[in-house]
């Protein structure tokens, strides 16, 4: 299926709002969406959700003969896949432009920056080395796949452990995890991509564009950095004109974002390690909240909260004082409550329901209070008007 | 490769150049009769051939045509004999499709595509010999070919690479310098407005060194633009003399 084009009014709306420094999801210009990193039960498996974008990375390894040109270095292989599951515009088994750019960017970000010590992956020089394969699958596409993919890939690489090997002469013994503890890869640094979207010929810039923003953007600049403020790759795309200062400014923003994300990854790794050590439950299944309706849930709409206090104060000052006599709840039996005048509750109450009932009652109480205030003021207004009328008539 | 000294104490590089010195640039325009525009470019030992067809009607599926501007179609390929090891696939692998994409994006930014709605411009580039800076040689060759075809552009697009060794930026890297694993920055610049049409960087570089590296690349690009300009002028002179006769 071809990608549904964005309607003109949507496009104009988006661009107008970007001009006013506003974004659809209520973020600021340089804000990232929420990043969540979870690890699977196996080593080297990791999902990253960046807002609604979800990406899964899986690292695996195998013993292969090395390249002739570099007999003592292990191999790194990256493969990113856009499954049609993630977005209807993705077609399987097709080399789309997006796929090529994402794959190459991932390769350049992680392989060319030499973040993994490939020499430590050598088993017998010139004969057997480890090939580390990183498969990244896009599960849901809501913009900024590159950043999500790079975070997922590097987290998975940090999490991964390869089997221990022993060499006797020419024989290689690969130990299963039960026999000997698997060894982690030696990761020198963690490069993370940060994407900048440019609008209106480079006048406006946004960090972490969502899918809609990606549809209206003019061009993209991806900067990969690590927390030591070293730039691992820069790539501009989309046929825009940039100025040198813009690139330098973006690199400064990227360094801040990268240090934040790196901290998040280390925290997530630390968490996982602790839970594994303590023998607690871990893995994807544990990270998903159970018995929750996810289909019809609606995210909280972002609200403008800049002048809430002022508005609230204004309303309170205008409103009438709350009534001094609040009906006290009548307690009929243990664990029951009643507000106002109603019939006595004759329902048989079970002990299990106690807590719920209690909270219900308190909620009801609150609601009644609010209702009473509103109705009171209305009634009074009506009364005053009538009085006026009457006084005029008389 | 660790033993290779990229910059000697006297400030000379592997091939005897100074840090900011470019390799010898030679170029010719109008090398093919059939094409609308063509050019041959040599930057040191890197040799590239570019051919431009168009603007013409959109070929293939009509759905690709754009109502407000021209489509630019690029194909990058490397001759099988261009590298030390014989290449199996001249085009179609990940690296060359990425390169095609980058060339396309570069020229979408530089060519005044809105003058030719519903049409297509084809740019075919072939690397005959690869010795570092393939992307920049391709861009420079394609620019000359576009000029030869008479397609209006905002400015010359000049591309050059720059590297960074021991706190010194090196301009226009050769293959040995590129494959050493150091930083490589490719920059496609429109020299008059100093607009960047494409920037790409590989390998690690500290943030503080970026301004110096970009400056070095920009200076190299401007130097190249002078050479390209003289090539165009010389070509025009030759052509005008021929037509007079």
Image: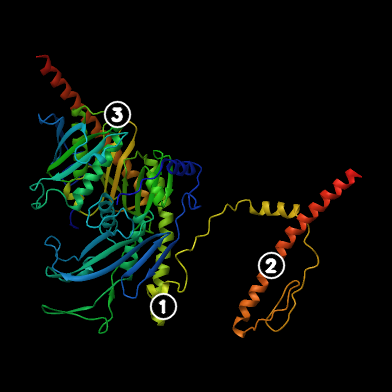
- Identify the disc placed on residue A168: none
Q: Say yes or no: labels 2 and 1 on the same chain.
A: yes
Could you classify mark 3 by the number of other residues whose Cα lies within 10 Å: few (under 14), some (14-19), or many (20 or more)?
few
Tell us which disc is closer to us: 3 or 2. Answer: 2
Q: Tell me the element at label 2.
A: helix
Label located before the other in sequence (2 or 1): 1
Quadrant of the image occupied by residue A334: bottom right
**Residue at 50% in and 45% down:** A21
Q: Tell me the element at label 1.
A: helix
Residue, disc 3 = B115
Residue, disc 2 = A366
- Identify the disc placed on residue A275: 1
Could you classify mark 2 by the number of other residues whose Cα lies within 10 Å: few (under 14), some (14-19), or many (20 or more)?
few
Could you classify mark 1 by the number of other residues whose Cα lies within 10 Å: few (under 14), some (14-19), or many (20 or more)?
few
In front here: A289 or A199?
Answer: A289
In front here: A260 or B9?
Answer: A260
**Residue at 32% in and 60% down:** A85
Residue A237 location, x and y as percent? 31, 45
């Amino acid at each position: 299926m071809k990608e549904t084009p964005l309607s003109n009014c949507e496009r104009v709306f988006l661009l107008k709002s970007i001009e006013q420094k506003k974004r659809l999801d209520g973020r600021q210009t340089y804000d990232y969406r929420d990043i969540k990193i979870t690890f699977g039960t196996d080593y080297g498996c990791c999902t990253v959700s960046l807002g609604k974008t979800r990406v899964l990375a899986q690292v695996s390894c195998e013993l292969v003969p090395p390249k002739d040109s570099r007999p003592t270095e292990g191999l790194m292989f990256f493969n990113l896949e856009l499954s049609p599951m993630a977005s209807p515009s993705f077609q399987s088994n097709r080399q789309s432009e997006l796929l090529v750019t994402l794959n190459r960017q991932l390769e350049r970000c992680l392989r060319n920056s030499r973040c993994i010590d490939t020499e430590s992956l050598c088993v017998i020089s010139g004969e057997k080395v480890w090939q580390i394969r990183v498969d990244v699958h896009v599960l849901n596409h809501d913009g900024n796949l590159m950043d999500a993919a790079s975070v997922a890939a590097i987290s998975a690489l940090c999490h991964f452990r390869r089997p221990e090997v022993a060499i006797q002469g020419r024989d290689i013994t690969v130990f299963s995890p039960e026999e000997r503890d698997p060894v982690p890869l030696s990761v020198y640094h963690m490069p993370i991509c940060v994407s900048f979207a440019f609008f209106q010929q480079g006048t406006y810039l946004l960090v972490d564009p969502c899918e809609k923003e990606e549809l209206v953007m003019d061009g993209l600049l991806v900067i990969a950095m690590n927390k030591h403020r070293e730039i691992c790759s820069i790539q501009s795309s989309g046929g825009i004109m940039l100025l040198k200062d813009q690139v330098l400014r973006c690199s400064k923003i990227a360094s801040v974002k990268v240090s934040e994300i790196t901290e998040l990854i280390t925290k997530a790794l630390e968490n996982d390690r602790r839970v594994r050590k303590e023998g607690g439950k871990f893995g994807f299944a544990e990270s998903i909240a159970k018995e929750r309706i996810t289909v019809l849930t609606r995210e909280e709409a972002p609200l403008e909260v800049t002048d809430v206090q002022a508005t609230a104060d204004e309303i309170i000052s205008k409103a009438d004082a709350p009534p001094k006599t609040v009906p006290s709840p009548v307690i009929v039996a243990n664990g029951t409550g009643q507000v106002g005048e109603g019939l006595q509750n004759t329902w048989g109450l079970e002990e299990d329901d106690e807590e719920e009932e209690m909270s219900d009652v308190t909620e009801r109480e609150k609601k009644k209070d609010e209702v009473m205030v509103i109705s009171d003021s209305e009634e009074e207004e009506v009364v005053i008007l009538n009085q006026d009328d009457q006084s005029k008539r008389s | 490769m660790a033993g290779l000294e990229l910059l000697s104490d006297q400030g000379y590089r592997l091939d005897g150049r100074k840090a900011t010195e470019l390799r010898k640039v030679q170029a010719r325009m109008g090398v093919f009769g059939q094409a609308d525009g063509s050019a041959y470019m040599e930057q040191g030992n890197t040799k590239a051939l570019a051919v431009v067809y168009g603007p013409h009607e959109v070929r293939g599926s009509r759905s690709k045509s754009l109502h407000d501007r021209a489509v630019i179609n690029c194909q990058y390929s490397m001759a099988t004999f261009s590298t030390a090891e014989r290449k199996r696939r001249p085009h179609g692998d990940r690296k060359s499709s990425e390169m095609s994409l980058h060339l396309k994006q570069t020229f979408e930014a530089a060519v005044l595509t809105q003058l030719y709605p519903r049409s297509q411009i084809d740019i075919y580039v072939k690397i005959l010999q690869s010795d570092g800076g393939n992307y920049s040689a391709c861009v420079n060759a394609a620019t000359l070919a576009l000029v030869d075809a008479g397609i209006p552009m905002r400015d010359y697009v000049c591309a050059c690479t720059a590297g960074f060794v021991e706190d010194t930026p090196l301009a226009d890297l050769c293959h040995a310098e590129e494959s050493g694993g150091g930083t490589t920055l490719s920059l496609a610049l429109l020299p008059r407005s100093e607009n960047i049409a494409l920037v790409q960087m590989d390998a690690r570089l500290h943030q503080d060194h970026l301004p110096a590296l970009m400056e070095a690349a920009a200076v190299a690009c401007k130097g190249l633009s002078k050479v390209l300009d003289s090539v165009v002028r010389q070509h025009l002179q030759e052509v005008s003399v021929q037509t007079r006769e």
